Amino acid sequence: MPQVLFNLGTVLYAVSGYLYLTGWLAHRRRELRWAVYALLGSVVLHAGAVASRWLTFGFPFLTLREVLSLYAWLLALLYLTIEWRFGYTVLGVLVVPLGASTILVGSLLPPAHEPLLPLLQSPWLMAHVSVFFAAYAAFTLAFAAALAYLLQERALRRRQVAWRLPPLAVMDGLSRWSATAGLLLMLAAILTGSAWAERAWGTPWVWEPKQVLSLLTVAVYGLYFYVRHFSHWSGRRAAWLVVVGFVSVLVTFVGAELLAPAGLHSFLFR
Amino acid sequence: MHIVVVGLNHRVAPVEARERLAFTKTSLEEALARLRPSDGSCPYAPEGVILSTCNRLEVYVLAPSLADGQRAVCRFLEDCHGEPRETFQPYLYTYTDEEAVAHLFSVAAGLDSMILGESQILGQVTEAMERALACGAAGKVLAALFRHAVEAGKRARTETAIGRGATSVSHVAVELAQKIFGDLSACHVLLVGAGEMAELAARALVAYGAGSLSILNRTRERAERLAAEIGARPLGWERLEEALWWADIIIASTGAPHAIFRPENVGRALPLRRNRPLFFIDIAVPRNVDPEVARLEGVYLYDIDDLRAVVEASLAERRREVPKVKAIIAEEQREFMAWFRSLDVVPLIVQLREQAERVGQAELERALRRLDDLSDRERKVIEMMAHRIVNKILHRPIIRLKERAGGCDGYRYAEVVRDLFGLDGKGGPA
């Protein structure tokens, strides 16, 4: 049953991504409206699938496949909030296909699921993983907004006004808001992770590749936070910094798997 | 019965001819009353709708033929305006049936407007129909025609980009400001100098919700006068530098021979603005804003040529949508014509005759089967009798139907006949 719900949700997610793309390209409002409904349906179905899994098997976000779906789910939830709040659909064109492909890539991976070692079973772990991917989702949204900002800014400078992109001020605010939220979530995730490591291994920090790379990401978004609040960078330079931050997120996630394929943070070891 | 439109528009007639035939609100009431007097007669045509805008005057009527319709409308316009037809007839165009329908649908879609795809015309088409319906000048056919036209116009605007993009300099200014600031309610607009086009742009920004408007002019009296007129705050010239700190949208249109806004003074203001974007609209010639200003971070500069280029681009974009709109019009036109044809009496008469002959033939065969030993002659006489009865019974109704079809409420006779004889109608309009 959870698998059926999950598959249905995945199909809806993909349909939503497709509708966002075509609806925006051909500017058909009706398609964009259906895209929102499809995404909403997908979020509900995935929530149902995850809840029923959690009740049967315990914490359901341990394999790579599972965390990718968690990421896509959080991304969709966050995006829906933003669209409901601001009413601009263009970010969906970027974010929803991205989320959909993440789930699809995840579902190609083997669905292995073994019970976790008793040593690692802890609410700290659950909080650590969930909050981390919430931070990733926020960073993705900040990146999408920064990208929309840069495209709009370029179009305005080149006098190409036909582009249907959202206003600079709105994208700037959104990007700032999401990046800040992402930074706070990431700090919280690092703290919970350390708390868990302390209990599991007796040491909060082991200088493992993923930890080091995460510090890099924190540094980039920390710099962003500083320049936005204390030195008044222009929107364009700040937007580039958000793009750099997202690259460092990708490096953290993918790079750590490559550098330490059997490390503590690897999702493939199961 | 045919649909005939007679009219003129901005393409074919100079303004002198258009204004001679234009109707005001009150004269339109009178004209519609003349078209369909309260005694129920119809001196010109059984149905009529008058579409009168500043760019066009068109009269849609039902008429027995194209020539009849044309004559009736000319007579009607003569009677309404007291102008001899020679003064306007050379400008008139006339379309009938498919062409008339396609013409009205193009008008409603904005294809025939001075500014391609403009949307005001759709409201004017709706209003023309409502007024004609209110005083009984429009009947079932023209009401259905205009409803279809409004539908075609709406579809054109929602399913294609014919109405998209700004087509005037002041609308371009608004559109750009929205692309930069989003919601304009937190924006301070500063008008420097007071050219006419700059004033229009400022008014448009305020109409779209700009938070405040200030006017800065070299002569303070002029600023004050204009400010009082459009509800703005007047400022003296000495406030120019300071205004750069807080203004978000600056519309420049002074007659100054050199740039007022230069990279030096704008650049000095930027740190104080905490990098809020600054949008310059330079409508002055020679330009008031040094083009180098556009290189500064967060500053967007559009001069008059840029704005005109945007207008041109959106018109070109609209022109590209014309084939799509024409496809929608053709579709709606086919649908309407199918319904309109079903009202025609000629196929009805054919159906009526066929039905009667079928009955006659069946009864004849039954009678002949019972009478076996008939000579050829006797047989012929009986056959002739059956045909004659059918023809004689139908003769008068058919003649009357043909006559009435051209008069007031002709289609009602057709409806009655269809109903009485149980001939299947093809359904009403969508």
Image (spheres, grey):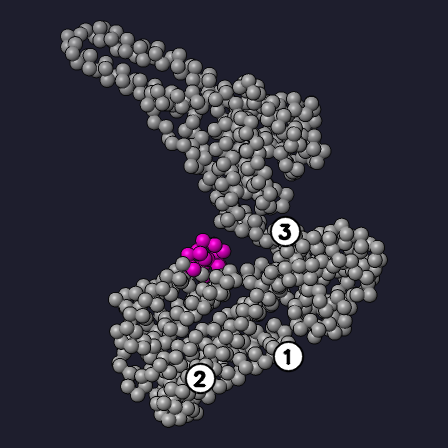
| Label 2 CA crowd tier, 10 Å (few <14, some 14–19, many 20+) | many
Q: Quadrant of the C terminus of chain B?
A: top left
Q: Which residues are magenta?
A: A21-36
Q: Nearer the viewer, residue B41 or B418?
A: B41
Cα–Cα span, label 2 and label 3? 54 Å
Kindly identify which residue carries mark 3: B167
**Is A34 covered by the magenta stretch?**
yes
Q: Amino acid under label 1?
A: Ser
Cα–Cα span, label 1 and label 2? 27 Å
| Label 3 CA crowd tier, 10 Å (few <14, some 14–19, many 20+) | many
Residue depicted at 62% across the width and 57% down the height? B175
Chain on which label 1 sits: A
Q: Main secondary structure of the magenta part?
A: helix
Q: Is residue B279 left or right of residue B421?
A: right
Q: Amino acid under label 3?
A: Thr
Residue depicted at 32% across the width and 23% down the height? B422
Kindly identify which residue carries mark 1: A231
The quarter of the picture where residue B35 lies is top right
The quarter of the picture where residue A45 lies is bottom left
Kindly identify which residue carries mark 2: A190
